[in-house]
Image: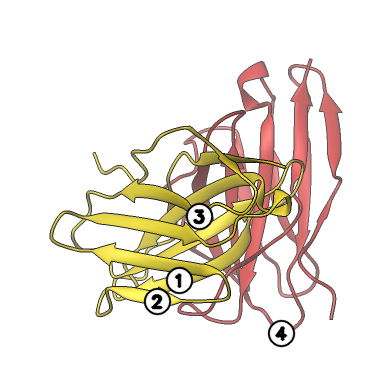
Chain colours: A red, B yellow
Amino acid sequence: NAGVMQNPRHLVRRRGQEARLRCSPMKGHSHVYWYRQLPEEGLKFMVYLQKENIIDESGMPKERFSAEFPKEGPSILRIQQVVRGDSAAYFCASSAGQDAELFFGEGSRLTVL
Amino acid sequence: GENVGLHLPTLSVQEGDNSIINCAYSNSASDYFIWYKQESGKGPQFIIDIRSNMDKRQGQRVTVLLNKTVKHLSLQIAATQPGDSAVYFCAENNHQAGTALIFGKGTTLSVSS
């Protein structure tokens, strides 16, 4: 049973470009969470999604960031017009239910030049 | 605001010693707490959890203690091994309210042989 799969593992973008990060949850999991981790920091909650629904986006920046979890395919975290401050590791986690254990992926490391 | 994870940022121990990593939380509504281990370049890995109706829970070589009176959480690792070297995060949430996990900043554990 494959774990949470994130890709790309590393992504380099220039300021103003778009970054798309993908997350395939564990088989049977319909709950997906995105977290951002700056160097030497803890993980900051961004958004919680279930299939086709955003449940909690209280941690998402108001502009440039969006997330989706379509009926088919992976969850996507999209960052438009990236800036240097967006450089971070972005982690996805999935669970089988709201009260179930979270399993994390290995993260996608975004570097903005 | 609410913070999780007042901590000593680094803990250095000798192999075979017992380690204690501490965490303070401020949200008295939190009812579920988890300790995660994060090795360099990897995603967080679940270690042990505890619900607010308990004050102690034991796993294999690890024990979590919860003191709700002073809002304090600790992770004890017995007979620490070099493979335990990592960053350890405490996380909390309010299961009843369906909130996402909130992470503290983490403590780096270094184990020397």
Specify whether residue A18 is in view. Answer: no
Residue that protrudes farthest toward the bottom in the picture: A28
Percent from the top left, x then y, of residue B82? 72, 49
User: Which residue is disc 3 drawn over?
Assistant: B18
Q: Which of marks 4 and 2 is in front?
A: 2
Q: Nearer the viewer, mark 1 or mark 4?
A: 1
Q: Nearer the viewer, mark 4 or mark 3?
A: 3
Q: Are marks 1 and 2 on the same chain?
A: yes
Residues at badges 1 and 2 in contact (C-beta under 8 Å)? yes
Give the residue at x 76% y 53%: A106
Chain of residue at mark 4: A
Q: What residue type is labelled 4?
A: Gly
The tag on residue A28 is 4
Q: How far apart are marks 3 and 1 (CA)?
A: 19 Å
Q: Is mark 4 on a helix, strand or loop?
A: loop
Q: How far apart are marks 2 and 3 (CA)?
A: 17 Å
State whether residue A71 is above or below residue B77: below
Mark 3 surroundings: few (<14), some (14-19) or many (≥20) residues within 10 A: some
Residues at badges 4 and 3 in contact (C-beta under 8 Å)? no
Disc nearer the start of the sequence (1/2): 1
Chain of residue at mark 3: B
- Left or right placement of residue A68 versus residue B27 in this view: right
The tag on residue B57 is 2
State whether residue A87 is above or below residue B56: above
Mark 1 surroundings: few (<14), some (14-19) or many (≥20) residues within 10 A: many
Residues at badges 2 and 3 in contact (C-beta under 8 Å)? no
